[in-house]
Image (spheres, coloured by chain):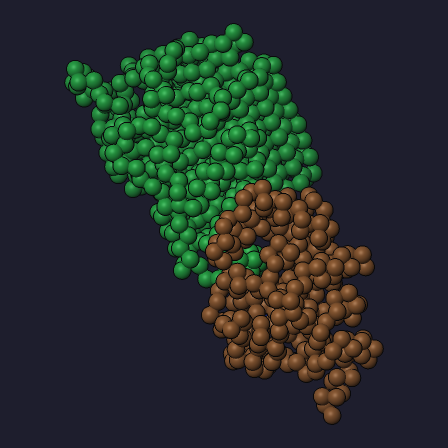
Chain colours: A brown, B green
Amino acid sequence: MLLEIKNLRVSVHGKKIIKGLNLKVNAGEVHAIMGPNGTGKSTLAAVIAGREIFEVNDGEIIYKGKDLFDLSIEERAREGIFLGFQYPVEIPGVSMTNFMKTAIDEIRKYRGLPALSAGDFLKMMEEKKKLVEIQSNLTSRSVNQGFSGGEKKRNEIFQMAMLEPTLAILDETDSGLDIDALKIVANGVNKLRRPDNATIVITHYQRLLDYIVPDFVHVLYEGRIVKSGGKELALELEEKGYDWIKNELDA
Amino acid sequence: MTPDQGSNSRIMKKQPRIRPLKENMAKLHRQFAEEICRYDSPYLKELRDSALSTFMEKGFPSHELEAWRNTSLDEALEREYLFDFDVQQEKADINRIFRCEIHNFETFLFTQLNGWYIYENAPLTELPNGVIAGSLREAMKRHPQLFAEHYGRYADTGKNGLVALNTAFAMDGIFIMVPDNTELEKPIQWVNIVNAGEPMFLQPRHLVILGKNSKLTLVHCDDSIQKENTFINAVTEVFTGEGSTLDFYKLQNKDAGSNLVNSLFIHQEGGSRVQTNTITLNGGLIRNDVHSTIGGSQCETLLNGLYLVDRKQHVDNQVFVDHLKPENTSSQLYKGIVDDEADAVFNGHIHVAKDAQKTEAYQTNRNILLSENARVTTKPFLEIYADDVKCSHGATVGQLDPEALFYLRSRGICERNARMLLMYAFAAEVVGKINIDILRDRIDQMVQKRLKGELSICDQCVLHCKDERDIVFEIDMSKIPS
Ligand SMILES: Nc1ncnc2c1ncn2[C@@H]1O[C@H](COP(=O)(O)OP(=O)(O)OP(=O)(O)O)[C@@H](O)[C@H]1O
Ligand SMILES: [Mg+2]
């Protein structure tokens, strides 16, 4: 098993957000997490990535057999966890190239791999840019600064392609994308799929799942996963909305 | 510089060691009038006399003055310093003393050592195109008419006692005159080195005159490489004639024991363009006053600064832009990173006179505090008497953006490097304003080195110091709540 979340409880500033959540993800799988606004989807993603403002009150997360909470933010990334941000951060003055070079250098060092030469690094950048069809000048600019909403999302997938994660969590990577961009991004994610890695996509729209076909769909509601199923669950949600689940829970 | 053995008694006489008290200064001025006033024209003589009485009235600036509320000279003024009236302008092998680390940086190099102008060929160079550059003392002697026209016309002795004191005592410094319609093909690099082996009180005085439509780039490196305390009270006057362009880069990399008060007065005529960049990488106590008077229209004034201070360093930037005439644009951008117990002050004052309509005046001061004991005092002061103006100011004091830190770390970058990237990016905005590629790259490297704690104040110097002292600007993570 790649990732196992057991009875996770998380709060922020004393407010309980995740309230006993369980999830298992195996290598090779794609999981989709759906659910109404404000139910804790981004919080779950941030806790996996190591965001410190969230307080873990109970439960555990085992990743590749290790207690995830023993690892710092950067160690998690070096161990192959990647978070595609719902709201990518603008960092004026730090160029994409410098950012990616620093990240790759550190990750390779951590993994005991030889440093990449400047030439090989640039070659890699070019290849990965093609994968998500992003404009070449984007990488000479400051990280996300002045990027359009769609460019920011593509940039997340570009970074994912550069870092080749084992577990990618994509938080609403589809929001703000036009149809063509959506296909490009989905296509990029699919090309990066391997039997030894896994992807969790957080989304509000069934449409994305036409392109990135999930093995499992989960509904996160009020801090817990209240329903899981196959890809047809997404279609059912699209059709019936969340009231159907709420009613089922109340019954 | 080792004193000439045979002339010890002379040196004893001409190099008194004394506390810089008000009464002592008057005494020194009387005692060494012959040396001080040797080349004075009647105009200069009068200027000195009146400056001395202004100083006697005002004394050294104290906390009671609004502009000196956050910088105290008390401690520095309690010590004894060596005052040097033994004119030591001399030929020297400059390359033995100073080696610029910027390779292929072609400049005209002018050097001051312990306050005196030193030269390889002549104390004052007069080029065929009319450019005159070199020792202020020599220029005072040879060009009294230029002095009567410009010297002492811009430096307001009423501003504070130190400007008056400098005016009363000034003996040497750098003089540059670029005639009308002339452009120097290389920047002038002017290096000020202090290495006396004794605590010194220095009062360099500089005058830069740009003729109509002339163009000059100045790179001023202020280094001190000695353990002993120094007190430098420098005054620079700059006149930029109609349509002229001046880029003025100041690099300050000073010893912890140095006290530097730098007063820069700029007078701009119509259509001129001035940019100053003051980059402070290290210093004991540094005070930079920039006083810019815009006396014509269609001028541009860009005043930028960057300060990276730690330990007990103190840096105080006081900027005053005086919009006297309509249709001018000024912009101030000062940024600083302050660590340990360091203390940074920024005071930006914009004055727009009643008939200075269509003025655009902007001011930004941004600070990052890295420790709980570090301090920043920032105060904008907009004094606007015209009604058709665009003015803005913004000051911030904050920490590194935690969201950005998380983002960088979530890609595998360790906290230390993530902080470094953010700090470097923060500083890069100011460094990016440097127009000479090679100089910008070098200062960029120095800033990176400084942020990594690897910049030494000996970096540019080939003097034979006994101990190389590294400057530490390491980020102590434990101090910063994330
Ligand atoms: N830093 C924070 N401080 C206070 N409350 C927070 C913070 N972060 C999240 N919350 C709250 O936690 C709850 C869950 O937020 P979260 O962002 O995880 O929701 P979400 O399921 O991703 O919603 P959406 O679909 O709108 O993206 C919300 O009520 C939100 O306001
Ligand atoms: Mg969300």
Quarter of the image where one finds residue B175 = top left
Horizontally, residue A211 falls left or right of residue B460, namely right
Displayed quadrant of residue B140: top left
Residue A60, position in %: x, y?
A: 52, 78
Give the total number of marks visible in the rendering.
0
Q: Which residue is at the far right?
A: A239
Q: Which is more toward the observer, B189 or B289?
A: B189
For the N terminus of chain B, the image quarter is top left
Q: Work out which residue is located at the far bottom of the displayed protein and give it.
A: A251
Q: Residue at x 43, y 41 (%)?
A: B449
Residue B237 placement (x, y as % from top left): 47, 24
- Residue lying at 70% horizontally and 55% vertically, measured from the top left: A154
Q: Is residue B247 left or right of residue B223?
A: right
Q: Residue furthest front?
A: A195
Residue A168 picture location, percent across and down: 63, 65
Q: Residue at 69% of width from left, 35% of height from top?
A: B358
On the question of residue B470 being in view, the answer is yes
Residue ID at (64%, 81%): A224
Q: Is residue A55 left or right of residue B113?
A: right
Q: Pick whichever, B279 or B137, lies toward us.
A: B279
